[in-house]
Image (cartoon, rainbow, N blue to C red):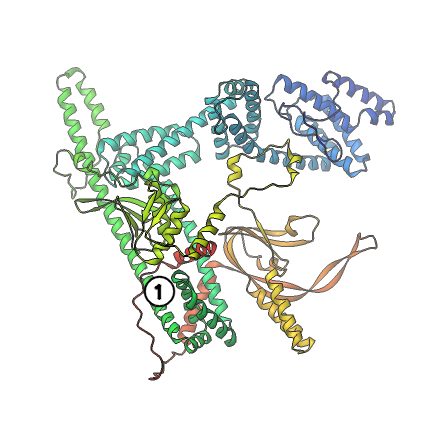
Amino acid sequence: MSNTITEGRDRELPPNRNGEVLRTPTPAANELKSEILQASAYKEAGQGDAMRERSSIESRTDLRLAATNEAMRDDPARSAATIVVEQETARRWADLDGNDFGRIRSDSRRENALEAIAGHMRASPEYAAAINIRSPILAESARVLNDERVKVEREIALPTIERNAGELSPRGSVAALPEADQHKLAQQDAKSLAVVPAGHERHLAAAVIGENARHHAPYREELERVAPQLAHEASAAAIERGVVRAVNQRNNELMVVPRDAMTVAEAREAVRQDQAAMGAIKDAGARYQAAVSIGNNALNQSVYRAELQIQAPEVAQEAQAATSENDRRISEKENRKAAEFAAMQLAKAERAMGWTPEQAAGQARKDVASVRTADATERHYVMGDMVIAADRSKAYGIALAKDAPDVAREVEARRERDAADRAAVEQRKGNLSAAVQARAALIDAAALAAVANVRKRETARAVEQLAGSPDTATQQLRDAQQSLRAPPLDGRVTAPNDPDIAVQQARAVKRPVDESDLSQALLTRFIVSHEKRGLLDKGSTEFSFRNGEEQGRVAFVDAGKALRTEREDKTTIRAMVEVASAKNWKEITVSGTDDFRRNAWIEASLHGVKVKGYEPREADKQILAELQQRTTPTNAITAAEQEQKRDKPSVSARTQAEPAPQRKHIDGDALTAHEKTVLDSSRTILNSKALGDQFTQAALRELESKLRGERVYVGEIVDHGRAPYQFNKDKDESYYVTLKTRAGEQVIWGKGLAEAMQERSSGEQVVLQNIGKRNVTVQERVHDAQGQVVGMRPKESQLNAWKSELLSRFSEKARTDLSHRSATRQPSLGVYDAKAPRAPEQPAAPARPSEQQRHADQQRNSRER
């Protein structure tokens, strides 16, 4: 037993690894009834002091825990909260505890006593009913404590099961644990699974336990002994997860097959297996995953889709619904990203519209300097910001044309090119959608015709074979026709004349790269398809964008010995290097533009691939070193505060490797460090000019209002309401708004948020903005000489005001204002000057990625720099 130092009195703890509840002293269980009767006799005799000494709340808790430990030795799987207390004993305890609790004055003793009463309530429904009649307030407090305890037990149940699974099968170890240790782990897992509520998480936990039982006989035997019902549940869950893995494996194998190249026989066998798998899966979450895989197969293989509609229409309908739901979730995520990007663009536009002529001129000079020193990629993004500034600020455009006319002409050309690109993208998306729908309808009809033609021939062969058996021919023919039934065909579509359609569809060339070697992240971003042109097979593989504005556009082509692309963005280059690594290329040669070769050298070097065709500069080597340092794990020695948590279960290694996103608390009323620095610097400058205190303070207040007004938060409302600041009960009450943003959950705090959030509810996409300060009267705490709060008094103060608008209304308002300003703005006329310098004619710039893609690449470039 390990040495332990704890703070305060002994308390009731959860059962340890041996199933015992730690608390001392614990009288023997067989003395329980005599102790209670003796305590009651003391009470009846009027010996109050002696009674309290032997029959306090703590001593009754010791008696219950002793009986609990005794019962758990006989039944290890039994919960510590299920010890049976006789009905008469429970009523006596409730009466005694109600009286004793009222006489306790020490806060620590009252807390311990409340925990004891909560333990009695868990152990005995009769005690809970009796204490509720005796003291409803005390019973409610104990019930709340029990609810918190159950919540904690549920939170640690899944990590405990995962940790035990890791101990049973440690990485790199072939030696099995001793049987005694496996028995203890089985008992712990049974108790942990018992507290997990029904749902998908319980199914996953049960599947882990079932896998443990399948591979470790002593673990399985102990689990079946202590909890046979949970053992059966775990075994069934493990079987279902195995079926889901089999469906996903078939999906991965079919992804290698070229589009619409499955034979009818292959499709029939695959559908038969998938139909049997769906019949064996009961958990809703597991069925959804399997249905999505089946839906992907149906999308890529028309013959499979036709067979699925014929053999299992219910499964086809479920797969279609799951695929639609999965697409909806992906689309919702993409729309949320697009909305955040649009909000950022609108914030830039609003900031530009608020510039004074001096600010606009200063910003123009900064942008010109940045453009002249930036590389091609950074120049592209800076020019995009300059287009927005020139459109929203007339003073900015005038200053830009005056200071750098060549840059102003380039900005105007960029604006026109971006407008043309957006129009072309919209038109291309419409044409592509119509073409895909028409092609899908034609393929479905042709696939049904092909399946029907093959089944007709099989039916004819079955009739010919059954002709020699007249006794059983009728019944067998009926069975054959039932199993080979074909749907009614559209008269406008006929089957091919070739007697064996499967021969034509089975022609395929081995793909240059096996799709199973590619990462799931790459397959999520790109559609991998075998490239064909009419009846000719080109023997190459196309990687097309799966989502976004460039959906369906080819990013690059794998021609076997070479990877080719017309693009030079980092997303495409990173994917090409990943494909090269999957093909086990240890050395590559790059050719093309300088940006392409430079970025390819960086990405390939990160993957450990040697590169020829590019000589890196010192700046390139420095960027590579920084990126390698970021991806290298850092060794660290932390404080030994974990020693206090030695007996608590820890999460598994896999859980630690994937930390959950943490909330970021933002004080909306306080200034940031950067804003304080700006104010301090401005105060120093103003004081040095001796303009007067009144003018200085007014200027600083105006500057602070401007800084606060630039605070804009965009996201989906998770929760909002009143609470102590940062949920710390020792701090003053404030108001919070929890937003789910692209960077994770953010909690914005500010008392003025209450008015702005009156008409808002969870799930809405909003834009939250600080709009300045207003004078209010607040209640201030009054402290005595010892620092204790003795009262409240009114105080004049200033409160930060906030404004919240729905993101859809905010975007519509911005578009309306922009249209109004565009309609009322006077056109600017150029003046010809024969002596003005002429800029050399620039070649046509290559097509640039979409706004959303540029924003994502800009953020990635900023991190890499």
In this rendering, would 142 be left or right of 315? right
Name the spot of residue 410 as percent of width and height, x first. Answer: 36, 70
* Residue position for label 1: 418
Res. 150 visible in picture: yes
In this rendering, would 369 be left or right of 417? right
Image quarter where the N terminus lies is top right
Res. 385 visible in picture: no
Task: Identify the residue at image location x=29%, y=59%.
Answer: 427
Name the spot of residue 822 as percent of width and height, x first. Answer: 40, 73
Q: Please tell me which residue lies in front, 222 or 842.
A: 842
Residue 256 found in image quarter: top left
Task: Identify the residue at image location x=54%, y=31%.
Answer: 163
In this rendering, would 327 be left or right of 176? left
Residue neighbourhood size for the residue with mark 1, other residues' Cα within 10 Å, grouped as few (<14), some (14–19), many (≥20):
some
Task: Identify the residue at image location x=80%, y=52%.
Answer: 788
Instruction: Give the amino acid at mark 1.
Output: Asp
Residue 95 found in image quarter: top right
Name the spot of residue 563 as percent of width and height, x first. Answer: 29, 48
Name the spot of residue 714 as percent of width and height, x first. Answer: 51, 57
In this rendering, would 599 be left or right of 159? left
Q: Please tell me which residue lies in front, 31 or 827.
A: 827
Task: Identify the residue at image location x=82%, y=24%.
Answer: 54
Q: Is residue 629 above or below residue 355?
A: above
Q: Please tell me which residue lies in front, 564 or 443.
A: 564
